[in-house]
Amino acid sequence: DAGVIQSPRHEVTEMGQEVTLRCKPISGHDYLFWYRQTMMRGLELLIYFNNNVPIDDSGMPEDRFSAKMPNASFSTLKIQPSEPRDSAVYFCASSHGTGGKSSYNEQFFGPGTRLTVL
Amino acid sequence: AQKITQTQPGMFVQEKEAVTLDCTYDTSDPSYGLFWYKQPSSGEMIFLIYQGSYDQQNATEGRYSLNFQKARKSANLVISASQLGDSAMYFCAMTDTGRRALTFGSGTRLQVQP
């Protein structure tokens, strides 16, 4: 089974340019998460989807960031315009949803996209 | 709101010894899950172990065990018989029924010395 796939793995761009990060979740997973990792802020949630619907976007920094999930097998995170402070590793993760009392939903992470904005 | 606290920025351990990485958490939800992830220098996030708030026994996965003390709101990771390949960042994280996304601690960098 292929894991979570992210592209590109590395992106170097100049300030002001548009950046699009892509994610293909594990087939059959109905939750998709976008996280960002920086030295200053650690690992933080940006947004997550359930059955392609955004559930919590409270972590999206500002209007420059947008995320979409047009179908169950694809999601994008777009930054327009990009700024140097957006430089980070962006992880996509996916999981099954579970019902009942358990909150168990092991999240499988992609390899991440390392974004550098000059 | 959820909160995860890892108070050990860095730890050293001798090869073959056991090590405990501390994690405390806070949530008002009685149903929650606690996770540990490993991040080696290559950058990927590797799931290690899970503990549910209703689980009666401490979780174990091979050399990893989770020392779950519910009243103290702690979920410490114990690695037995450390190996050089255990050198990595370790993150404690949690979810609850109100939030499926992981809330992470700041991490502990473990270095295993030969």
Image: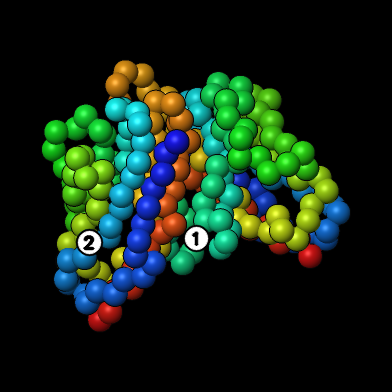
Q: Residue furthest right?
A: A16
Q: Which of the labelled discs sits on residue B20, or is there none?
A: 2
- Please tell me how many numbered marks the rendered image carries: 2
Q: Quadrant of the C terminus of chain B?
A: bottom left
- Name the element at disc 1: loop
Residue B69 drawn above or below residue A87: above
Residue B90 drawn above or below residue B59: below
Q: Quadrant of the N terminus of chain B?
A: top left
Residue A17 drawn above or below residue A67: below
Q: Mark 2 lies on which chain?
A: B
Q: In which quarter of the image is residue A106?
A: top left
Along the viewing direction, whichever of B15 and B94 lies nearer the viewer: B94
| x and y, in percent, of residue A4 in the image | 52, 41
Residue A16 drawn above or below residue A51: below
> Is residue B2 in sight in this rendering?
yes
Q: Check disc 1: other Cα within 10 Å, few if <14, some if 14-19, many if 20+.
A: some
Along the viewing direction, whichever of A63 and B113 lies nearer the viewer: A63
Query: As shown in the figure, which amino acid type bears the numbered disc 1?
Result: Gly
| x and y, in percent, of residue B49 in the image | 28, 46
Residue at (35%, 61%) from the top-left corner? B7
| x and y, in percent, of residue A66 in the image | 73, 36
Query: As shown in the figure, which amino acid type bears the numbered disc 2?
Result: Thr
Q: Which of the labelled discs sits on residue A71, or is there none?
A: none
Q: Which of the labelled discs sits on residue B43, or is there none?
A: 1
- Which is nearer the N-term, disc 1 or disc 2? 2
Badge 1 and badge 2 in a common chain: yes
| x and y, in percent, of residue B9 in the image | 39, 67
> Is residue A104 in sight in this rendering?
no
Q: Which chain carries label 1?
A: B
Eye-nearest disc, 1 or 2: 2
